[in-house]
Amino acid sequence: MTGMRSNRFAAPFVMGLVACLTALLATGGCGAGEASSIVGKETLVIGVRPDLPALGLRTGDGRFEGFDVDVATYVAGKLGATARFVPALAADREKLLLSGQADLVLATFSITQERKTRVAFAGPYHLSYQDILVREGTSGIANVRDLKGRRICEVQGSNAAQRVVDERRIDASVVPVATYDECMSMLKSGRIDAITTNDVILAGLAARERGGVRLVNTQFNEQRTGVGMRRGDVEGCERVNRAITDMYQDGTAARLLGKWFGRSGLTLGKVTVPQFEGCS
Amino acid sequence: MMFLARRTVPGRIKVISSVTVAALGLLFATLAYGTAAAREGLRVIGHDAGPQVVATAGLYLGLSDMDAQVATALLLGDRRQDALARYEKRRAEVGSALLQAHTLAGSDAAERRTISSVLEGLGRYERLASEALLLSTLPAAGSPGPASPSGGVVPVSTTPATIAPDDRALASYRQATDLMTRELLPQAYNLTLESGTIVRHAYEEGHSTVIAVRLVALLCGALALGCLIWLQIYLARSFRRVFGLALLGASVATAACGIAGAVIMEREAAALATAKRDGFDSVLTLARARAISNSLHADQSRYLLDPVRADTYQHTFFDKSQSLVYLPAKNLSDYQRAVASLKNDRFLGMLEGRDVAAAWRRFQEADRSLRAESGASATSALTGPVRSAFDAYDATLVRLAEQHQAAFARAIAAGEGGLSGLWTLIPAGLVVITGGVLAGVWPRLKEYR
């Protein structure tokens, strides 16, 4: 009688013991993975520019090439993922991230406090400066103040031209356009006087022209080019920052800058890791 | 399941006792595991990455202020003694901060590489800075220059009070400040951020383990207690004895150990959470805020010193200001208007930030008057009202940081105190309970011999 009774007790106790052990073992394997983190994805969809030579340019066969593309490939590799690229024009960068169509955006995406209210940034992975591109033979434009009364183009989604007008209160007339190609043809035909944006963009455009245009080389705004991400993925952001640190420490950053801008007339200086924005 | 099928009384007693002892073993093993996890978490947060944040933030502040003092010395001409003294003081602080950061980096290869890179860059920086300072005292080639009319190296009192540094001095300073702001400061800042990452990982791992251990400890404690009660019921039925004092004692001790273990784990989890959220996170946020504040204060000197780059320095001042207190504004004057009418009692989301927010308003106000001036009056604004407004603002940051630093230290100490209690509970409990079980079961088993 007692034997029967104890047996009915014994089974749950043994099961309890097993459950105890299982729980103990399981606690070791619990990570802090968020469902929306870029960490652990096999493929990272990365938005890059399709329209900027040397930074992100779609080639004839539909592939992408440029500095941003190489950095994206490196970062994705450090995160153990393969990169799949999608085109991200200036105006589309935030949309791609917020709609989930891209996991990361490396598309000359400058970090600003205003943008940070909507998207997060890892990095910056490169510091550039705002500069001015003019036609060969243009005189009287040596710095940003000389843009007063001049016509400059503004590519949709880029804030470079507005920064001249709003931050500097320089009375330039801003001509809105869709792409830098359009800007370039307007500059050559004399419909605008100058293009102002990141020096790396201008250097890439100038290099493709092989003459006819000139970089003024007046570095007037620091532009911190970051990796656009969705907000809240702290782990992912820190992993990207570590990848960027590695990229600078192992010499890859210097090699890539040399590869894409070494002959562009851009002063590269000593290549060192930029000050990160921080992930929280 | 074979041995459970043994229906003899001593066989069954042995089985129940074994299950009891196994559950007890598991309870104490779990608690030991939780203790180790909590201890490691507290070590990393309290004694490794936590202090590293303070060391690297100190490194950043020292470096940033060295550069600010060089700019100020160049601006002030012959009244540079104070600035040079402060430069030397900062240089010494940077040296000890580097040493400490290097010690705390331990075996982290990336951190050590960064620290040696800062050390190497610092040598180059000092060379460029002394070059700029020396050049500014020499007569400039082809221009009246800042030096004394007699052409001596040491400026004499007839030198104008405020002098524009000559182009060669400025060129050297540009190289120096570029080296500082583009190479050295970013590395120091990233080291601070990296410590934040290390702490976040240590916290998440430690905290989730301790929470799980608490649950498992309760489960195992309940299981062991159940086994003990079962054993007593079984013995009472088989031997017609109502009380087994030893087993009763063992049951009470088991319940006490299980509950005490769970409570201590709960407290450890709370200590880790307090140390991380109320202590460390705020200390890190304030360390970053102080670093950025110091560098934007240095941008004010650079703005006055270098007319060619004045626009850029004004822009970096604006950008850094916005990163501390974000207000939608298109340019610095818009921003400063918005700051003036700001009715915010928080600073960086911290509730206790009222003083800081007020000091920030006064500092931005002082900056606005600085930018309205030019030449000598701008320089005196910088070294007068702007400097004191900045120092007052910085002091409020330091006070707030000290509050959080104290909360941090308290939480770490509380966590470590709780662990030492557990460390005595585990062996004592194991001995007492196992002894009780043996004492309760042994005489019954002997009856079958």
Image: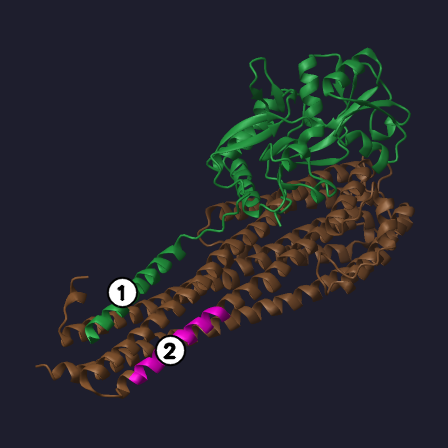
Chain colours: A green, B brown
Q: Is residue B84 above or below residue A107?
A: below
The residue shown at (77%, 31%) is A160
Q: Is label 1 in a helix, a strand or a loop?
A: helix
Residue kind at label 2, given as amino acid type: Ala
The residue shown at (69%, 50%) is B64
Where's residue B207, x and y in %? 49, 61
Where's residue B172, x and y in %? 72, 39
Q: Main secondary structure of the magenta part?
A: helix
Task: Specify start and end residues of the magenta stretch as a single range.
Answer: B248-267
Q: Which residue is mark 1?
A: A11
Q: Looking at the rendering, in which quadrant would you find the N terminus of chain A? A: bottom left
Q: Tell whether B183 sits left or right of A183.
A: left
Instruction: Say which mark, if any, is on residue A146.
Output: none
Please rate how many residues cluster around mark 2, counting C-alpha atoms within 10 Å: few if below 14, some from 14 to 19, many from 20: some
Residue kind at label 1, given as amino acid type: Ala
**Residue sitting farthest toward the left:** B449
Q: Is residue B253 magenta?
A: yes
In this orientation, which residue lies closer to the viewer: B53 or B355? B355
Where's residue A38, x and y in %? 53, 40
Residues under numbered marks 1 and 2 in contact, where contact means CB atoms less than 8 Å apart: no
Q: How many marks?
A: 2
Q: Tell whether B60 sits left or right of B162.
A: left
Closer to the eye: label 1 or 2: 1
Q: Is residue B399 magenta?
A: no
Q: Which residue is mark 2?
A: B255
In this orientation, which residue lies closer to the viewer: A149 or B304? A149
Q: Which of the chains bears the disc numbered 1?
A: A
